[in-house]
Image: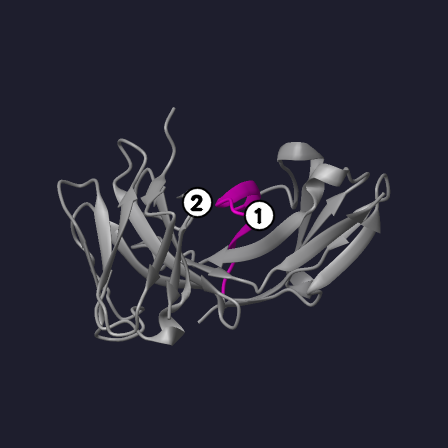
Amino acid sequence: GAGVSQSPSNKVTEKGKDVELRCDPISGHTALYWYRQSLGQGLEFLIYFQGNSAPDKSGLPSDRFSAERTGGSVSTLTIQRTQQEDSAVYLCASSLTVGSNLEQFFGPGTRLTVL
Amino acid sequence: AQSVTQPDIHITVSEGASLELRCNYSYGATPYLFWYVQSPGQGLQLLLKYFSGDTLVQGIKGFEAEFKRSQSSFNLRKPSVHWSDAAEYFCAVGAATGGGADGLTFGKGTHLIIQP
């Protein structure tokens, strides 16, 4: 069956521009997670959704970051006024429902480069 | 808050040799523990997980891990590595809060190099 997909796979942008990253979770998975993977910080948890709701946004690095999920399916992570330190691989994962004991299935990621 | 330490940034092993990747965690209660593998340009794939019960868990691709509460460790092992095992390995801990998901906390990863 189809796994988690993310688009675009690569994104190069100029400092100050806005970018949108998309995640399509596995069909039927109600929980969706965003992580950021960078050389300096390793893998950082950013935010999770249960359905369309994100109960805790405190993991987002700054107020330039926002995320939404519609129809309990596709999610977008938006970064406004990108900075060079935003360069990283952004990974999306989904699981059947919310719960730290459940396997999270990861997408291939979007590599973001801010020039 | 939980944390994960993977002391070895790089490990080089000869093909056919045994492997042990170290992972230490910090968490106030019994955690949920995971090992993921990431091949170049790929997402993370779950190798195995520990929640409770038998402290020796078997995973895919011939990997196993042992949970040692007294040492706060969850080391990954494989008796004989193959060239295809070359990848980045991540240990992760999930908070066993029983409520909402806090996301996984990952270690920095161990880069495994296989020598022919």
**Badge 2, how many Cα within 10 Å: few under 14, some, many 20+?**
many
SS category of the residue bearing label 2: loop
Tell whether label 1 touches label 2 (CB within 8 Å): no
Q: Between residues A16 and A103, which one lies in front from this camera angle?
A: A16
User: What residue type is disc 1 on?
Assistant: Pro
B54 versus A45 height, above or below: above
Query: What chain letter is assigned to the residue under label 2?
Result: A
Q: Please give the residue where the numbered disc 2 appears in the rendered image.
A: A108
Query: Residue B73: percent from the left, percent from the top?
Result: 66, 60
Q: Please, which residue is most extreme toward the left here?
A: A71
The answer to which quarter of the image holds residue B25 is bottom right
Does residue A98 appear to the left or right of B54 in the view shown?
left
A16 versus B116 height, above or below: below
Residue that appears at 24% across and 74% down? A16
- Asked if residue A111 is among those painted magenta in the image, a careful observer would answer no
Query: Residue A113: percent from the left, percent from the top?
Result: 39, 64
- Asked if residue B41 is among those painted magenta in the image, a careful observer would answer yes
Q: Please give the residue where the numbered disc 1 appears in the rendered image.
A: B40
Query: Residue B48: percent from the left, percent from the top?
Result: 58, 41
User: What residue type is disc 2 on?
Assistant: Pro
Residue range highlighted in magenta: B29-52
Residue that appears at 29% across and 69% down? A60
Does residue B13 appear to the left or right of A7 in the view shown?
right
A114 versus B62 height, above or below: below
Query: What chain letter is assigned to the residue under label 1?
Result: B
SS category of the residue bearing label 1: loop
> What separation in Å lies between label 2 and label 1 (alpha carbons)?
10 Å
